[in-house]
Amino acid sequence: VFMRNVFKKRECTEYVLQVIMNKKVIIGNFKMNLLPNEVVLYIENLKKDIESNNEIVLCVPYVDIPYASNIVNDTNIYVGAQNMYSREEGPYTGEISVKMLKSIKTDYVLLGHYERKLYFNETEEEINKKLILALKYNIKPIVCIGSNESLENEINMILKDIKKECINNIIFIYEPVFSIGTGNALDKNEIIDKIKLIQNIICEKYDEKFNNLTLGYGGSINSNNVLDIVNNDKINAILVGSSSLNEKEF
Ligand code: PGA
């Protein structure tokens, strides 16, 4: 009603409402790419080109975070880390803690990416500890699921001891292993089926009807297939790897 009164013209109102209703979280995962000066240039270019009302999250390497977070003020671009350690502090040489991320203005953190499991033997127990810390320190977690044979086991392990009130603060991304970096994005209908399944598992676990979960998909998304994937109200976040490295493509 407010929009209708402000904009008067029906077309304009409909457009604004549509944009609001369809707002998505678009996440770029740079992995181990781009130096601080390259990330700064990327963001400056993105700011010039951007016409989107969506929330854009750039998960950049740790060393790039301070440079990135300094130049995204007053934009819809947010800065994320790609990992963090599962303990708060202590003798863990080479690790980065949640408090360190907080101190350099990190808004989001990617947790449980398949490459962390593949190359660093990360377990669901570790991911669960990290999730608890991210929620405690108010860094928004983006949790990747889809690499365990049982989605139900995976979700239950990751959400162990996570309170019901926190569930709406987590972004859940379904990323099937065979779609990551292979060029084989999952068919949209299959993605929607998995997303419904994930929603059901979470609702059953908490015996609660969550209607505002942020659920999304990742794996071989590019500018050719993205519209087909996001053009529905079930998929409200996407995680983009290699196609996020060039800001024009992203
Ligand atoms: P991709 O990577 O888009 O290159 O498949 C996705 C990811 O690793 O999150």
Image (cartoon, rainbow, N blue to C red):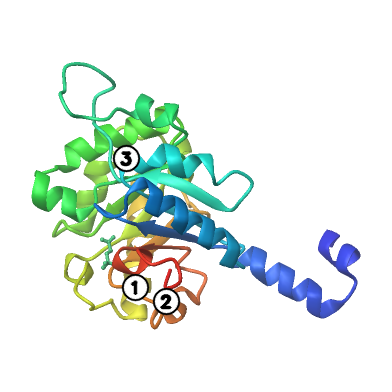
Q: Position of residue 241 (x, y in %)?
A: 31, 63
Give the quarter of the figure containing the N terminus: bottom right
Q: Is residue 167 left or right of residue 160?
A: right
- Which residue occupies 28% across, 77% down? 186
Q: Position of residue 225 (x, y in %)?
A: 38, 81
- Which residue occupies 49% across, 41% down? 69
Q: What is the crowding at mark 1: few (fewer than 14 residues within 10 Å), some, or many (at least 20)? A: many
Disc 3 residue type?
Tyr
Disc 2, disc 1: CB below 8 Å? yes
Which comes before the other along the chain, label 1 or label 3?
Answer: 3
Give SS at disc 2. Answer: helix
Give SS at disc 1. Answer: loop
Give the Cα separation between the discs numbered 2 and 3: 27 Å
Q: Which numbered dot is residue 226?
A: 2
Q: Position of residue 4 (x, y in %)?
A: 85, 67
Give the Cα separation between the discs numbered 1 and 3: 24 Å
Q: Looking at the image, which is closer to me, 79 or 216?
A: 79
Q: Quadrant of ligand 1?
A: bottom left
Which comes before the other along the chain, label 2 or label 1?
Answer: 1
Q: What is the crowding at mark 2: few (fewer than 14 residues within 10 Å), some, or many (at least 20)? A: some
Camera-nearest label, 2 or 3: 3
- Which residue occupies 34% across, 69% down? 243
Q: Mark 1: is the Cβ under 8 angstroms from ligand 1?
A: yes
Residue labelled with disc 3: 62
Residue labelled with disc 1: 221
Q: Quadrant of residue 27?
A: bottom left
Give the Cα separation between the discs numbered 2 and 1: 6 Å
Disc 1 residue type?
Ile
Give SS at disc 3. Answer: helix
Q: Is residue 135 above or below residue 186?
A: above
Give the quarter of the figure containing the C terminus: bottom left
